[in-house]
Image (spheres, rainbow, N blue to C red):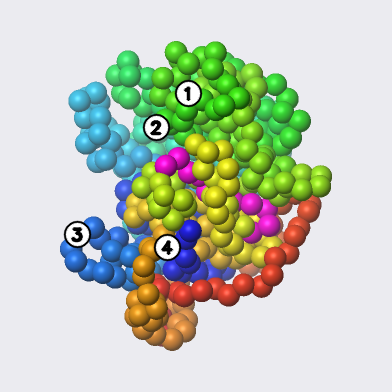
Amino acid sequence: MYDTICTLPLSSDLFTQATHPSEPVLAVGLAGGHVQTFRLPTVATSNGDSKAEKGFGTIETGWRTRRHKGSCRSLAWSFDGEAIAQEVKERITNIQSLPLLALYTTGTDSLLKAASTTTGQVISKILLPSTTPHTHDTPTHLHVLSPQTLLLACDSSSLYIYDLRTANHLSTSPAQTHQPHEDYIADIVALPGSKESQSGMSKQWISIGGSTLAVTDLRKGVISKSEDQEEELLSCELMEGLQVGKKGGGSKNKKKNNGGEKIVVGDAGGVLTLWERGEWEDQGERIVVDGGRGGGESLDSIVKLPEDVGGAGGGGKYVAVGMGDGRVRFVDLERRKVVSEIRHGDVESVLGLGVDVGGRLISGGGGVVKVWSETIEGEGEEEEEEAVAINGGKRVVGSDSEDDSDEDGKREESSEEEEIERPKRKKRKRNKGKQEGEGQHVMAFKGMD
């Protein structure tokens, strides 16, 4: 089980969020077009600081800007070049040519932008391809496949592939265009690179759109597409080391799946489906996360948890699933069952789930982001009172710049009167839960009164 350690209020509804690959930093994209970064306290391991070990401390706003006219629909961190160099330095000879770490964002203004992660200043920006002589495509999902490749899915169901090996981070036109689905792409997850690969980077990925799952290869294009699942597919995650279930799903492909790789897919009816790698025609197993008449709540987001998580049931293969009614449920994939749940909110869907480098769970939906820490068994009320004392009373957020700056240092115009797009609800059904308290807030905000 997890406890809330902080609630971050946002200026408008959350559309997207992403955790930094190597630092305790969170980026959020909002319905009002703003992009904001937060730096969380570092989680210590052996320095004897009890507060740091629990992830308590001060949250700092890195930068905040109105990046897009209209909503910011998706954002993604690029690969950390230094981390890549350490991990695969023996197989990558041109590591110095990799792009610097950047934050990519895209919005309903049909712009794709790359910005400095430290200052937020725009490094490069391009206009998305045209769908008609007078309109441009609008984005739905960003995914950084490798240091060289960026995937961008759009409302038109097109999937654009951009080459990042350019002087200004982004090429002006996509290197490839595919249409793996008839509907827009809801989520993308990369398949691990093969052991024979010289770079070790992913060259294939899974996408879900409408009621189908597809596999696309960077060199060959779309190589496989599933049968119609007769339910909208909304979220997906890769899990490794999973055993074949009792029903025998995927047993005919054991030789190809020696790593136990499965894709976990959440649908609009409250069911997780497991897909064996190499058997993409149809799902192998089903786990009911939320049942009920006419189907359960939509499973709008999913993230795998660290294997040493004890709060969700003692460690193992777990995922957290964000639901359409504001709940987050934890699923044990080895036992194929739900083991516990927490509540992010009472009505709004949990559109964002992530785990930062300190192992903290971060949920986002509606106008708030929440940071969760594992419940440590045996902690008493004395420690809770100490955490409250760290924070003091209520604090008011200081002002930030509302304007975006491009690479020439010019400020882009913003209009607060523009209509703000609301994040789509995947299900019409809305079950309001009972009002719950926010719990203890054990993080403070720097620069607040």
Residue most toward the left?
47
- Between 255 and 334, the one lying in front of the other is 334
Instruction: Identify the secondary structure beneath mark 1.
Output: strand
Q: Which residue is mark 3?
A: 46
Q: Earlier in the sequence, mark 4 or mark 2?
A: 2
Q: Which residues make up the magenta segment?
A: 316-326
- Between 276 and 104, the one lying in front of the other is 276
Q: Earlier in the sequence, mark 1 or mark 2?
A: 2
Instruction: Identify the secondary structure beneath mark 2.
Output: strand
Q: Which residue is mark 1?
A: 204
- Between 106 and 373, the one lying in front of the other is 373
Point out the frontmost of discs 2 and 3: 3
Say which residue appears at 50% left-offset and 64% top-offset: 370
Distance, label 1 to label 2, CA atoms, is 11 Å
Residue neighbourhood size for the residue with mark 3, other residues' Cα within 10 Å, grouped as few (<14), some (14–19), many (≥20): few
Q: Earlier in the sequence, mark 2 or mark 3?
A: 3
Q: Earlier in the sequence, mark 3 or mark 4?
A: 3
Point out the frontmost of discs 4 and 1: 4
Type of residue at label 3? Ser
Type of residue at label 1? Gln
Type of residue at label 4? Thr
Horizontal and vertical percent position of residue 362: 47, 57
Residue 289 as seen in the image, left or right of residue 240:
right
Q: Which residue is mark 4?
A: 375
Point out the frontmost of discs 4 and 2: 4
Say which residue appears at 36% left-offset and 47% top-offset: 308
Write down the quadrant of residue 121 in the picture.
bottom left
Q: Earlier in the sequence, mark 1 or mark 3?
A: 3
Q: Which residue is mark 2?
A: 146
**Position above or below: 301 against 197:** below
